[in-house]
Image (spheres, rainbow, N blue to C red):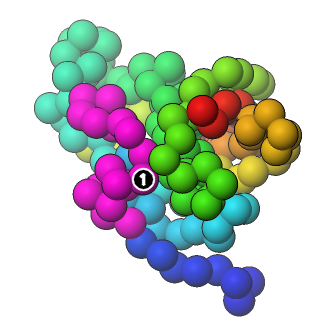
Amino acid sequence: ENDMSNVIYTKDQIKEIIPHREPMLMIDEVTEMIPGKSITARFHLRPELDFFRGHFPEAPVMPGVLTVESMAQASDVLLLSCERYAKTIPYFIGIDSVRFRKKIEPNDTIEIKSVIENEIEDRATVTCYVEVWNGEALATTGKVTLAMR
């Protein structure tokens, strides 16, 4: 895998690529990217994140819908890094085959691996297959479809 470019984006660099901001920014850094193909991003689940206060106070866990949001955002960075989609807004138009296998709790760091699976260029829509890893465990899998507008 010689074409593996170890481009590392910080949170500030991610904010230059995608429009998301706190409290809805769900990735902290990008550790690997093959432009136009795949990306690996990380999100550190800081215990003070607001959603933990209510989901659930006695047993805090990252909401599944926010895990899916992190899957989309990693995919967004991958897509908006492509010249044809730079400076567009990525709208969620589909979520498919998502399965939650392991909890994501405060102080966990998840690794989000997204691969472009299908692209309809004349419609500017892209489907990515995404895996979320929590340490050695596969926490979540699924597909996200985005429309670049």
User: Which residue in the structure is indicated by mark 1?
Assistant: 17
Quarter that holds the C terminus:
top right
Nearer to us in this view, 75 or 84: 84
**Residue type at numbered disc 1:** Ile
Secondary structure, mark 1, is: helix
Q: Residue 123, percent across and down?
A: 80, 34
Nearer to us in this view, 121 or 48: 121
Q: Residue 143, percent across and down?
A: 72, 33
Q: Residue 63, percent across and down?
A: 42, 20
Quadrant in the rendering for residue 120: top right
Magenta residue check for 36: no
Quadrant in the rendering for residue 107: top left
Q: Residue at x 19, y 35 (%)?
A: 47
Residue furthest out toward the bottom: 2
Q: Residue at x 54, y 52 (%)?
A: 86
Nearer to us in this view, 31 or 54: 31
Magenta residue check for 23: yes
**Rendered position, 64 above or below 114:** above
What residue range appears in magenta?
Answer: 9-25
Q: Residue at x 32, y 29 (%)?
A: 24
Res. 34 in view: yes
Query: Does residue 79 appear to the left or right of 52 in the view shown?
Result: right
Q: Residue at x 29, y 56 (%)?
A: 11
Are there few (<14), some (14-19), or many (20+) residues within 10 Å of tag 1? Answer: some
Nearer to us in this view, 100 or 12: 12
Residue furthest out toward the left: 48
**Rendered position, 121 above or below 10:** above
Res. 110 in view: no
* Number of numbered discs: 1
